[in-house]
Image: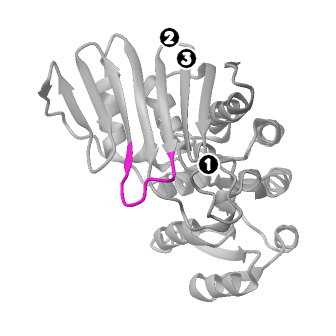
Amino acid sequence: MAVKLGFIGTGGIAGAHLNTLKTFDDVEFVAMCDVSEDRAKSRANEFGGKAYTDFRKMFDEVDMDAVYICTPPFAHGEQERIACEKGVHMFIEKPIAITTEQAIIINDYVQRSGVITSVGYHWRYQSNAQTALSVLRKEKKILGALGYWMGGMPGTPWWRVRAESGGQHTEQTTHIFDLCRYMVGSDAATVHGVAASGTMTDIPNYDVDDMSMVNILFKNGAIANITSSCVMNNWGRVHLEVFSRGLVVMIGGPGPLVSRNGQAEEVPQVPGMDRDRVFIDAVKTGDRSKILSPYADALETLKITSAASKSFITGKAIDL
C-alpha cells in the first residue's frame, strides 16, 4: 500500500525530497501546498496531488498518511499542531522553530498524539557521520569539538531577517550544532555566545549577525566552540572536528578524516541511510528505531541555538 503524502512548502528543499520520493514505488503524492499558488500548481502538475495555498483547507479536504513540512523557521507551528490533531505523521525541515517556547508546545502535541516525526538533520544519516560515530564510540572520553559554518549569505530574503530565520546560527549552522550533539553524545548544560555585525550595512533588510561564536558545555563534560559567518564571499569552512586524547575526527566532505597521534588512520566505512526512505518505512511499519532525529531530539538542538540568541543579547551564559 502506498503512503499518501502531502507537502507544505514546495520550494528548494522540498524539491530535493520530492525528487527522491518520486523514485519510491510505495509513495503517492496527494497534495501540494505553498503560499505561491503557481509553485503549488507546478509541483502538483509534476508530481501529483491537488494544489493548495491554505494548509488548513488541505488538512480538511485531503486524506494523508504523512506530510512534509518544508517551510521557513518563522512559519512553523500551526501546521504541526493540526497534523498531530489529525494523526498525520510528519517530516519537518530544520530548524523546527526560531525559539524553544513554541517548539515545546508542539512537542507536547507530538508526544500526546503519538505521530511519527523526523526532522531534516540529514548530516546524521550520511556515511561520513556514521563512520565517524563508529570511531568515536570506541573512545573512553570525548573532550570537545570545534565546528564551523562560514561562507557567503544565501539569497533568500527571509534568511537575512532575524525575526524570520533566527539568524545564521539558528537556520544554517544548526546542522553543525546538531552534529556536535550527536557526536559528543550529550545534550547541552550551559551555552554562552558572542556576536559581531556592522559590515553588511549595504544589504537591505539585513539584521542578522555577521559572525558569531558559541561555547557549549555539555552534560557529559565535553566542550565545544561553534563559529558562524555569512560574510566570507568565495570562501568557506563547513565542518566539525571532534577531539579525544590523541585523536581528531573531522566530519565534512566525502568522508571523515581520522588522525590518531598525528597519523592518518584508515577506518572501515559505515554505510549511510536515506532520510526519506527511513521516514517512509517508519510510517509504513510503525518502527521508528531508524529515525535519527525525531522532534523531541531536534528540540534539544534548538535549545542550544535559542540560548545562544539570548546570550548574544545579555552577554551572560545561559543554563539549560
| Residue that badge 1 annotates | 198
Tell me the colour scheme of the image. one colour
Residue 69 appears anywhere in the view: no
As displayed, is residue 12 above or below residue 89? below
Q: Position of residue 171 (x, y in %)?
A: 61, 49
First in sequence: mark 1 vs mark 2: 1
Rounded to the nearest angstrom, the CA distance separating label 1 from label 2 is 35 Å
As displayed, is residue 234 above or below residue 236? below
Q: Are marks 3 and 2 in contact (CB under 8 Å)?
A: yes
Q: Which mark is residue 221?
A: 2
Q: Residue at x 54, y 24 (%)?
A: 215
In this view, the mark in front (3 or 1): 1
| Residue that badge 3 annotates | 217
Q: Which mark is residue 17?
A: none
Q: Tell me the quarter of the image containing the C terminus.
A: top right
Rounded to the nearest angstrom, the CA distance separating label 3 from label 1 is 29 Å
Q: Which residues are magenta?
A: 229-238
In this view, the mark in front (1 or 2): 1
As displayed, is residue 233 above or below residue 19? above
Q: Residue at x 52, y 36 (%)?
A: 177
